[in-house]
Amino acid sequence: MNHTKASAEENPFEAMHARFDLAAGKLGLEPGLYQILRTPDREITVAIPVVMDDGSIQVFTGYRVQHSLARGPAKGGIRYAPNVEIDEVRALAAWMTWKCAVVNVPFGGGKGGIICDPQKLTKGELEKITRRYVARIMDIVGPDRDIPAPDMGTDGQIMAWFMDTYSVHQGKFLPSVVTGKPISLGGSLGRIEATGRGVMICVREALKHLAMKAEHCTAAVQGSGNVGLISALQLASIGVKIVAISDIAGGIYNQKGLDLATISAHLAKTKRLEGLDCGETITNAQLLELPVDILVPAATENVITSRNAQNIKARIIAEGANGPCTAGADKILDQKGIFVVPDILANAGGVTVSYFEWVQNRMAFFWTQKEVEDRMEHIMCESFNAVVDMARRFSVSNRIAAYMLGIDRVATVTRMRGIYG
Ligand code: NAD
């Protein structure tokens, strides 16, 4: 294996830039705007000293990157993982800018991360890390500045600590500083299901577009966390047969269809697939290459690269995860005629309902689940159609069309606002 090539291909910020450059070229973006939109507005690195349960002191590193504030306050999750890197956070922040613009919610893009292993920390240590991180980034976040949310390794409890620390320092109740909160603390109905439901809506629209029928289709889903499991359940609800699912340790495959009720109950109890006896054991690499109609990579970045793209057999790939395909893979998937619903569209149901949560917090008036679902459905279908239409008009892939749509919307407001100074 060529490690140098692989690492360049797999650098998420370079992967974002590769697509940005193609889309900017197609749009004929002027050189000044090209430079502005390629560069994050602000990034900070903070030291987070914490007294651990055993009395020792550990200093963790945290990041917050605000890629663009042109269309509104930055919006994007916070990731707790041992391998968080600044280039990954930069890429995720930029993807949030394009994603918010694709679904036309009034936010810019941001992302944060802390280098830590949440599995190895106690609840008390996680709380201290979170609160100290909030104190460190206090000046740049806020309901009108930057609104974080959960991502890999973070959850509603962490958002509750975030919101509490911020509110205590500001001297008032400010739930709209974060989204993805527990319902009892101002979270929105439908937020937990939102990303997986958005994936399903995109697949359903893609099937219509390709004149395929859900009830004749099979799907493999990589990942069984919030996005993976809910995408699987949602796809099953429209008649798709789910034949494979995985977690970080590997997957299970059953050609006849998996028993998702048993899998959900097992995951709720143990948080992992290990111990289930409803199919044959496969690796994550094998799952991606299964002979299915629909493939949903919903775990992590860089799983479909120039090394395995040729072996993908699915007709539709719906990217539940952020950045699951590299730019090298894009070319091969295009040549194979695979219909890719890119991450900045496919998983945008999450940020759409996060926007609804922020709106509800600011109004202090809450919507029913049906209102949330209907509004999200409308936005996802409109965005899907806008991307497919752009792809047709410019003869580009869906991914480049989505970037073009997002970049054009950000460029338009940046031109209107002008360059101050
Ligand atoms: P999660 O932590 O709930 O679940 C992640 C799943 O992926 C788990 O099943 C885990 O075991 C598996 N996994 C992790 N690393 C893996 C690897 N290297 N190989 C195979 N499987 C692996 O996270 P999530 O919230 O479901 O997020 C998954 C992806 O979706 C991430 O890319 C995230 O940025 C993206 N995303 C999440 C949301 C959201 O609302 N949660 C919204 C948009 C995008």
Image (cartoon, rainbow, N blue to C red):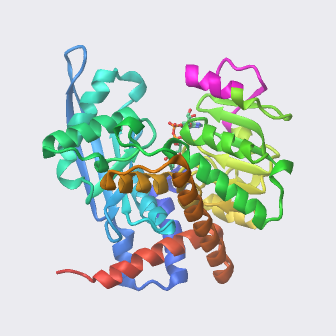
Residue 302 visible from this viewpoint: no
Residue 127: quadrant of the picture: top left
> Residue at point 70% right, 54% down?
309
Q: Could you tell me how many numbered marks the image carries? A: 0
> Residue at point 56% right, 36% down?
225
Residue at the extreme top of the image, as rendered: 54
> Residue at point 56% right, 69% down?
402
Rendered-image quadrant of the N terminus: top right
> Residue at point 64% right, 60% down?
341
Looking at the image, is 55 positioned above or below residue 386?
above
* 381 in the magenta segment: no
Residue 315: x %, y % from top left: 78, 57
Is residue 21 or residue 232 the one in the foreground? 232
Residue 284 visible from this viewpoint: yes
* Left or right, residue 196 beside residue 353: right
Looking at the image, is 54 positioned above or below residue 389?
above
* Left or right, residue 224 beside residue 120: right
Residue 74: x %, y % from top left: 33, 59
| Magenta part of the chain | 262-284
Rendered-image quadrant of the C terminus: bottom left
Residue 223: quadrant of the picture: top right
Is residue 171 or residue 250 the one in the foreground? 171
Is residue 19 or residue 373 the one in the foreground? 373
Residue 385: x %, y % from top left: 64, 71
Residue 310: x %, y % from top left: 75, 55
Is residue 402 or residue 378 the one in the foreground? 378
* 270 in the magenta segment: yes
